Amino acid sequence: MNRMVLVGALVVMSGALASNAVLAQSGTSLGTVHIARKMMADGKPLAAGTYQVRLTADEPKPAIGQAPGAERYVEFVKGGQVVGREVATVISAEDIKKIVKGKGPQAGGSTVEMLKGGDFWRVWINHSGMNYLINMPPA
């Protein structure tokens, strides 16, 4: 019984440490992306252009069964000003292979592509062993 409690505590602590490791990156620039067309970010238009994408400490309330830290807000920065904000799904390098089909960006890189059906653009950033997927509708 004591072993089970100890194992359970270790599992919870390791999950918290992994979540905190992602939180430690708050305010970090995830990279630069070029958006060729006007999109919507958090319900507001985001003009075509080149943006620095920055990770924030803010995260939406997790859905039932979703791990804390699985989604985080990112900011689109241009000329030193935050001009847009959107939710990014955070996926480890190990898990991304199981979830997403096709080739993603190289480590330290990003891609912007229209998803099948034309309803959403996906901004995909690969930074420090984590993948940040940001889905935005066209404006």
Image (cartoon, rainbow, N blue to C red):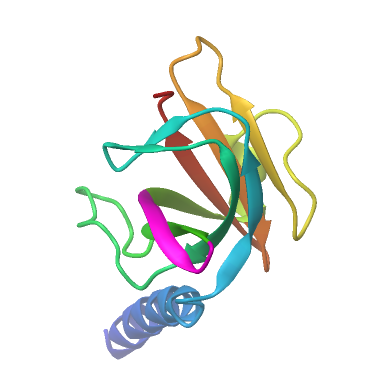
Q: Which of these two is toward me, 125 or 42?
A: 42
Q: What percent of the width, then of the height, locates residue 19?
A: 42, 74
At a point 38% along the width and 84% down the height, the residue shown is: 13
Direction from residue 129 to residue 133 in the image, left or right? left
Residue closest to the far top: 117
| Magenta run includes residue 81 | yes
Number of disc labels: 0
At a point 36% along the width and 58% down the height, the residue shown is: 73
Direction from residue 95 to residue 61 in the image, left or right? left
**Quadrant (top left, top right, bottom left, bottom right) of the N terminus:** bottom left
Q: What percent of the width, then of the height, locates residue 90?
A: 48, 55
**Quadrant (top left, top right, bottom left, bottom right) of the C terminus:** top left
Dominant SS type (magenta): strand
Direction from residue 119 to residue 98 in the image, left or right? right
Residue 14 drawn above or below residue 94? below
Q: What percent of the width, then of the height, locates residue 133?
A: 52, 45
Magenta highlight range? 79-86
